[in-house]
Amino acid sequence: MRRVVITGVGVFASTGKDVNSFFENLLEARSGVCRITRFDPSALSVQIAAEIPDYCPQDYFPPKRLELLDYFTQYSLIAAREAMESSGLEVSDEERPRFGVVMGTGMAGANTFDSGYFNLYAKQATRLHPFTIPKIMHNAPTSQICMEFGAQGPSLATSTACSSSGHAIGAAFHLLKYDMADLMLAGGSEAPITYGTIRSWESVRVLAGGNGDPARACRPFSADREGLVLGEGAGVLVLEEFEHARKRGAKIYAEIAGYGLSSDASHITQPTVDGPARAIRMALREAGANPEEVEYINAHGTGTRLNDPTETAVIKEVFRDHARRVWTSSTKSMHGHTLGAAGAIELVAAVMALERGIVPPTANFTQPDPECDLDCVPNQAREKKIRTAISNSFAFGGLNAVLLVRRLD
Amino acid sequence: MNVAEKIIEIIVREQHIEPGKVTLDSTFAELGIDSLDGVNILFALEEEFKIDIPDSVAQNMKTIRQVVDSLTRVLEGKDISDLVELAKGGAPAANT
């Protein structure tokens, strides 16, 4: 059976505009959450988000190209460039049909919708800009990355809310494993910081308040947690068939050894224990891993009242006695909930934890919650040469994705 | 500034090309204007002149001179039904 390894990583997020600064900030428990600057948030009850600081699109794209790119596609391209750069890949013309892209997003071109509909409804415009459709479509990142890097192989987009990029990476992993490609760029991106989007999330009543102290607003697994904080950004990984990577002497970050997915088939917003548990077991089975082998879980850990105790119950259900020993942190406490980018950004965090031998903490932890009695690595990064980690993504709609990564040595 | 100059200015702006490159006799093909660029330019012209350019007329615009002639007639409120007739059976503006 073909094996699949990660040979490149890229991140563009509130906590860092490249993988090194992103991971360093996570280790220092530095939050990327701030008062919203993208527009005037004064009218909102929640005025905070994990925004990419001082973002200037013109620094990354020429004017004509930029006109066709919503923020979520811009972020995906920036992260993909870093991933390709770190992989050292030079893809030949012959290899292009075996080189594909899978990217996930939940909300796609929310900024373009928001400004377009504002013109239409509030300003009584009679027409919308002709680039509206190519900018808002969920496959814009996949297609723009394909065009930029000449990827002509199996390519698609996934949209499963907060599991979108978990599913994207899983799909890419299986395309490689089942010999349909040799190289894949996979990940996800999201740019949900618009007036309309935040209003929509507000009314679901899952957002943390914390306007007075944005950096501490998101407190996963803490008894006083108030909810999630929306975040923006992208994560992209280069996945490569093992022999292909070995022959070219590539630096191998980790092996993707298992992927599990499942549907709760229960409720459109409330999570179950059984659905996510089945996804974790599926990932363990594919990797041939015992539960005891897993030393780190990058949790879904949104910081909502409902997610964190449910996820705790899921982990206990699968890992039994090992559940309280396995380090389980939520980096969403710092980079926010990046929705369709979350699975990718958090897998990069898990891969870097394997690579560097240090696990990022759950920031802002204040007091234990008996219903969330896992070792959530509170506030302080911990050093340990871990070998196996999983990354959980559980979504509104009950569609779950779990990825298992392992050091090769 | 007359209509022709204004149209050329808009095309230069939307395409991000050098002003001197666009003349009345330039074709869209020569200027590298593809189907998506074309609908973008039409949008900008409609916004600038506060007019509607029917799809059937738009499809027949392949050179700058055709754009200028058609728009001049639309702006002067002249009958453009012959342009609509001429364009019947034209290619769609963009692939869907």
Image (tube, rainbow, N blue to C red):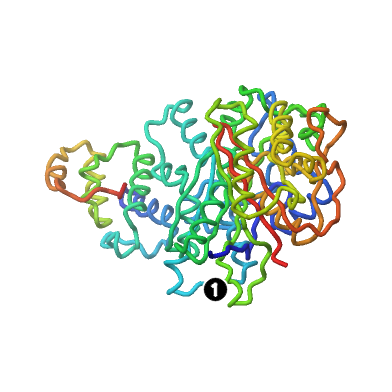
Q: Secondary structure at mark 1?
A: loop
**Quick check: A276 left or right of A363?**
left
Q: Mark 1 = which residue?
A: A90
Residue A94, position as x, y percentages in the image = 43, 74
Identify the residue shown where x is 79% and y is 55%: A24
User: Does residue A367 sit above or below A31 in this rendering?
Assistant: above
Report in which chain the residue with disc 1 lies: A
The x and y percentages for residue A346 are 68, 48
Locate residue A232: give its quadrant: top right
Relative to A376, does residue B18 appear above or below in the rendering? below
**Residue pictured at 54% horizontal, 35% vertical:** A263
Name which quarter of the figure residue A11 lies in: bottom right
Q: Position of residue A279 (x, y in %)?
A: 60, 42
Question: Which image quarter: residue A407?
Answer: bottom right
| Nearest the eye: B81 or A287 | A287
The count of marks equals 1
Q: Residues within 10 Å of mark 1 (few under 14, many from 20)?
A: few
Residue at 24% from the left image edge and 48% from the top image edge? B92
